[in-house]
Image (cartoon, rainbow, N blue to C red):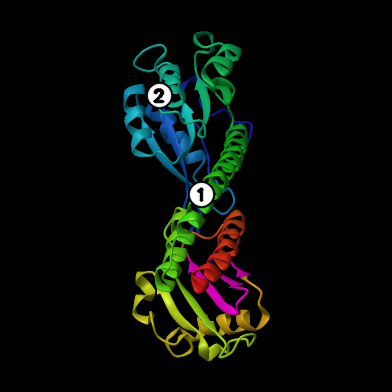
Amino acid sequence: MVADDDFLFDDDELVGGSGQPESKQRLTPWKVLIVDDEQQVHAVTRMVLSDFVFQDRGLEFVGAYSGAEARLKINENPDVGVILLDVVMETESAGLDFARYVRDELGNRHVRIILRTGQPGQAPERRVIVEYDVNDYKEKSELTAQKLFSSMTTALRSYKDIMTIEANRRGLEKIIKGSAELFRSRSMDIFLSGVLQQLGSLLEYDVDGFMLSGRGTSLGERPSPGDLTVVAATDRFATVVGKPASANLDPQIWSTVSNVLQSHESVFETRYSLVYFQSVRYRDTLVYLETKRGFHPFDHGLIKLLCANASVGLDHVVTA
């Protein structure tokens, strides 16, 4: 085990330390691209960061040993969150050329670039950070395990915030587009299936789910649980479409549905969301979504917003 003030890349010695990696990572790991022409640098970086966890997510390492190879890797892995980048590889400016490629040619402003150089004179810090949109600059001779951990935490926190803002922007665009498409529907079945499809598109990752809908026997009367029917579903729940929900859903799921129907309050958990919305014509509709990745809090707001728009569209379809 190495103390926090031990240098990682001093005199080309392989120095590093780590605890035991987490036996289980609940969520998808953050991707880190290591770009360096020295095998030892790759080895010690992986060793020191083997037990790194940020917001319940570990790290997945992608390695490249030249600027040219790094271009291939970043194109294969567009979801890389952090790049640990050497300057001098096959050429004296290979690293800087790659940084410019990422920012200017790929237009990737999201990934955080940490420059690590053994020859600081080749790339003066102030000029590099300004001209190449590099987010951090470290000299290998001064880099310790603690500094690497700190830099990685700062980089991933910034990356997460940037991606959250970007996801919200894309989500709102999709809500506007999706709502317009839903309002063009005249068929109830097409409309309700469209809501589920738009929710899947909005979240931008794999979700399973279904939609329940029902109304009372007369205007102003609340529907009972037995009135609810599965009107749309993804593949996992496809066999229950068109069937009464109470008799065909998993009992645990149905228990949650019943509680939401009584309370009229949506439920948002890490692994699933159950959204309740109601049209002014007293049709109750519930959307159940589940994911292995885990919902982010900003997903909840986008889901509720689209469902609120869908409740207006539902009345539009009923009266058309």
Residue 222 point in image, percent of width and height: 62, 86
> Disc 1 designates what residue?
58
Of the pair 218 and 246, the residue shown nearer to us? 218
Image height of 35 relative to 118, above or below:
below
Name the residue furthest top: 121
Task: Say which amino acid is labelled 1.
Answer: Gly
Image height of 134 relative to 251, above or below:
above
Q: Residues within 10 Å of mark 1 (few under 14, many from 20)?
A: many
Which residues fall within the magenta stretch? 267-290
Of the pair 170 and 119, the residue shown nearer to us? 170
Which quadrant of the figure contains the N terminus? top right
Of the pair 126 and 24, the residue shown nearer to us? 126
Task: Say which amino acid is labelled 2.
Answer: Glu
Q: Residues within 10 Å of mark 2 (few under 14, many from 20)?
A: few
Q: How many marks?
A: 2
Q: Which residue corresponds to the image point at 40% horizontal and 24% vertical from the top-left?
A: 105
